[in-house]
Amino acid sequence: MRKLIHLLLIFSTIGIFHLNGNVIKPSRQFGTELLQPEQIKTINSEIYILDRGDESIKVYSMDGAFKTKFSGKGEGPGENMFATTFFVDKDKIYILDPFRKNQVNIFSAKNKKFLFYKRTPSMFQGYGPLFFATSNDGTFFCSNYTLLKGQRVIVKLDKDLRPINAFLDCIPMYETEKDYFKAKDSGIKPFMNNGYVAVQGTSVYFAYFLLDKVFKFSSDGKLLKEYKLPLPSIDKKVKLHVWQDGSSDLERRLNYGIKVVDNKVFIMSRNDSGQSILYELKSEQFVEIARMNEMLLAFEIVGNRLYGIHDGEEGAYIYDLKGNLQ
């Protein structure tokens, strides 16, 4: 996971929407409350950001004004030791903490109050859950980092987070768990089957890091279509960065996210200079519609606005996409 210096940011208007060589500048920047933001969602006309700096969810207005926060670091009810992702449905907010035996803390989307948690050994069938998407019928799809021959990359879960089925054979890095533990210090292979999942009606989209493709599946796991991504999804010269304490992180220049908004499919990636590029699926291919100089780690689109988390400056920005979204 990222380990970067936490910078204090000011909340201020830094300019109005305009294009400069097809580069959109942010219109607003979020404030000093954010320490190490990782993911962003919209729920009931509010912005929710998972902040790994204090293991909380921070809530903002659609204009970026801080409102409240909930959850936090600890081992008590509703607290997290190492929250890696959160996902939502109409009524609830789910925060996944793999460090507590894949515990999922569940909150009310209405009042942000902690309701209960789930922790079942079979929830993810031994896989490492990463990113979630919610379907219209309340079921969930989870992408996993998988390593071993025979494992699946995507798991479908019911409303109680119990596995229904798994699909998409992973590209195996190891034949057995014994082989994996022998090569554990390689540092890069656990990331190779990584990717983001999104749902549109009865279709499931998966942006696959390793193959530079987006797959489209039916909700029962049947492959419907493959799309070639405009840019390679992960730098072929990717290396490990070793920190002073001896721990290591995967250095990433190019990063994907995928979103379905109002039946439109969007992909976010980066070019070699670090610019973030937003693509939309049009006429069965991904077409560039905007680019930003900031390196974005995660994004959300609401109306004509793009909300993006900066990968490196520990901040979040608002961009106006008016004129870019047709």
Image (cartoon, rainbow, N blue to C red):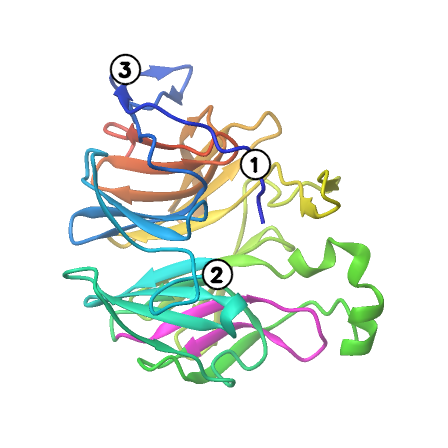
Q: Residue at x 83, y 64 (%)?
A: 183
**In this view of the protein, can residue 117 be seen by the observer?**
yes
> Is 255 positioned to the left or the right of 97 in the image?
right
Distance of label 2 from label 1 (alpha carbons): 18 Å
Task: Name the residue tied to disc 1.
Answer: 4
The stretch in magenta equals: 138-156
Residue 140, placed above or below residue 277: below
Disc 2 or disc 1, which is closer to the eye? Answer: 2
Distance of label 3 from label 1 (alpha carbons): 27 Å
Task: Name the residue tied to disc 3.
Answer: 15
Task: Name the residue tied to disc 2.
Answer: 81
Question: Quarter of the image containing the C terminus?
Answer: top left
Q: Residue 226 at x, y = what percent?
A: 52, 59
> Is 6 positioned to the left or the right of 150 in the image?
left
Q: Residue 113 at x, y = what percent?
A: 21, 64
- Label 2: how many residues lie within 10 Å, few (<14), some (14-19) or many (20+)? some
Q: Which one is earlier in the sequence, the residue at label 2 or at label 1?
A: 1
Q: Residue 313 at x, y = what percent?
A: 48, 29
The amino acid type of the residue labelled 2 equals: Met
